[in-house]
Image: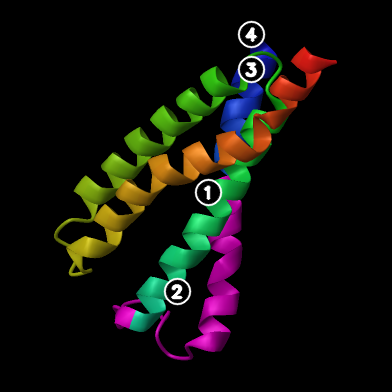
């Protein structure tokens, strides 16, 4: 049970770390857009969403890959944790001036990314069942 919680929470922390790690790269690509107190234009936000998609697929894959039991169950709880946290951030930042499509797109991408990560990482279950 403890290993399952560690895999799910660790995978979520990995997703946040990867998203935060993409900020310096995006700041280099779009100088002046990712500055405190400034709302970026559309192109940097789209690039940020693309980075989020890659990070979330990778994190869901890690969750499925290192799940001690059923990868589907672990990725489901990873998905629930991400949606709850995402909803909290979306609600808290709704009136911050950022475009609403930005946070809503992240909320919509999360389940798709979790499913893709599960499909990639959950393949080991099929391989071990055959062996």
**Residue farthest to the top, as pictured:** 1
Image coords of residue 28 (percent x, y): 57, 86
Residue 4, numbered circle: 3
Which residues are the magenta region?
15-42
Q: Marks 2 and 3: CB-CB under 8 Å?
A: no
Q: Which residue is mark 1?
A: 56
Element assignment for label 1: helix
Location of the N terminus (image quadrant): top right
Q: Find numbered disc 3 in the image and state the secondary structure of the residue it sits on.
A: helix
Q: Earlier in the sequence, mark 2 or mark 1?
A: 2
The residue at the point 55 percent across, 38 percent down is: 12
- In percent of width and height, residue 108 lies at 31, 48
- Residue 86 x/y as whole percent: 34, 44
Q: Residue furthest bottom?
A: 31
Specify whether 16 is left or right of 10: left
Q: Is residue 45 above or below residue 121?
A: below
């Amino acid at each position: 049970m403890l290993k399952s919680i560690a895999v799910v929470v660790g995978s979520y922390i990995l997703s946040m770390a990867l998203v935060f790690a993409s900020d310096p790269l995006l700041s280099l690509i779009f100088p002046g857009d990712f500055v405190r107190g400034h709302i970026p234009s559309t192109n940097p936000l789209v690039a940020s969403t693309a980075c989020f998609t890659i990070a979330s697929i990778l994190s869901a894959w890690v969750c499925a890959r290192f799940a001690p039991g059923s990868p589907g169950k672990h990725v489901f709880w990873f998905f629930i944790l991400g949606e709850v946290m995402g909803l909290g951030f979306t609600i808290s930042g709704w009136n911050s001036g950022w475009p609403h499509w930005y946070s809503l797109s992240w909320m919509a991408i999360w389940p798709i990314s979790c499913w893709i990560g599960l499909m990639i990482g959950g393949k080991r279950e099929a391989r071990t069942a055959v062996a």
